Image: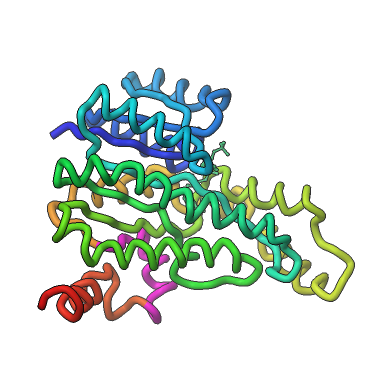
Amino acid sequence: MSKVILITGSSTGIGLETAVQLAEQGHKVYATMRNLQKRSMLDNEVEKRNVKLNVRQLDVQDEKSIEACIAEIIASEQRIDVLINNAGAGFIKPMEQASMEEIQQVMDVNFYGPIRCSKAVMPQMRKQRSGHIINISSVGGIVGSPVNEIYCAAKFALEGLTESLATYLEPYFGINVSLIEPGGTITEFGNSLTDYFESSGGILEDDYQPLMETYMGYRATFTDEFKEKAFQKPSDISAVIIKCMNDPQPKVRYMTSEGVAAFTKVKTSLDPDGEILKTQVRKGVLDK
Ligand SMILES: NC(=O)c1ccc[n+]([C@@H]2O[C@H](COP(=O)([O-])OP(=O)(O)OC[C@H]3O[C@@H](n4cnc5c(N)ncnc54)[C@H](OP(=O)(O)O)[C@@H]3O)[C@@H](O)[C@H]2O)c1
């Protein structure tokens, strides 16, 4: 059955590939991006793969743009079946060196952004008594990693939010919520975060210098050849997103590779898809 789908952050990477794949499968896709001047990569892919989709402006940090976009979709489709909260950005800097403005920006894009978009679609999904909100988290939403603490904190927050919503949104309102947890994926993500790090001061000559030199040395091993072998491709992640969307009873979490599952096993082995805890919490709190 064709679904009406809104996806954020479709100018590149996982969002772009997911939007095109969903359109190839006959869904009504609203592929959104904050800056329509960056639409040419998506337009080229759409033309190459001979599909149709709708491109709209939506900045996850701007409530007005979210409301306008969602109002337009509901006016023309009378429904909205799936929201894919994909827009996000990495950030590397030790917490002590990051400004409060930078920390708030990372939280705003990766955590408040999905909240804003979800709050905006939920009235329609409740009215329909159906819907699926899919939040793109990360392996960094399960395991903390050095110098990535602010990004990990934002994705941990997204995980806590989603786990909590999953305990009641489906039984009370018919809305499913899920997390997708990619590891390293070949997109603009890594380049954007190192570009920002360099442009905002790079490695400073201070107590953190040895740590940062070691960490940046580790990042320098991510050559194109290495990524080709060890990273996933956007199409690998979109396949998991689509599997999640098509599951008759969607799970709380979907890891995208054996590598992510192995790396996080010490934390997730007893409940890899989050269903045991969800049921336990539902029973303990709601099923009275
Ligand atoms: N690539 C990885 O290794 C990896 C691993 C784990 C999780 N993830 C997650 O996967 C998701 C997609 O990332 P990606 O790998 O595809 O990276 P990407 O190629 O950098 O794409 C990120 C997308 O998010 C958009 N975006 C950023 N801020 C936005 C805002 N305020 N409003 C709307 N869109 C905004 C970007 O738009 P602009 O083009 O305008 O910047 C871009 O379209 C993110 O949530 C990321 O955290 C990625």
Q: Is residue 221 visible?
A: no
**Magenta segment:** 252-267
Does 238 lie within the magenta span?
no
Vertical comparison of 62 with 108: above or below: above
Give the vertical position of 80 relative to 226 (above or below).
above
Q: Please state if 167 lies on the left or on the right of 157 as rendered.
A: left
Residue 68 location, x and y as percent?
A: 41, 29
Q: Quadrant of the N terminus?
A: top left
Residue at 46%, 67% in the rendered image: 156
Q: Residue at x 68, y 69 (%)?
A: 95
- Asked whether 264 falls inside the magenta stretch, the response is yes
**Vertical relation: 273 (above or below) 53:** below
Of 18 and 201, nearer the camera is 201
SS majority, magenta: helix
Q: Residue at x 11, y 75 (%)?
A: 287
Provide residue 199's location: percent of width, then percent of height: 78, 48
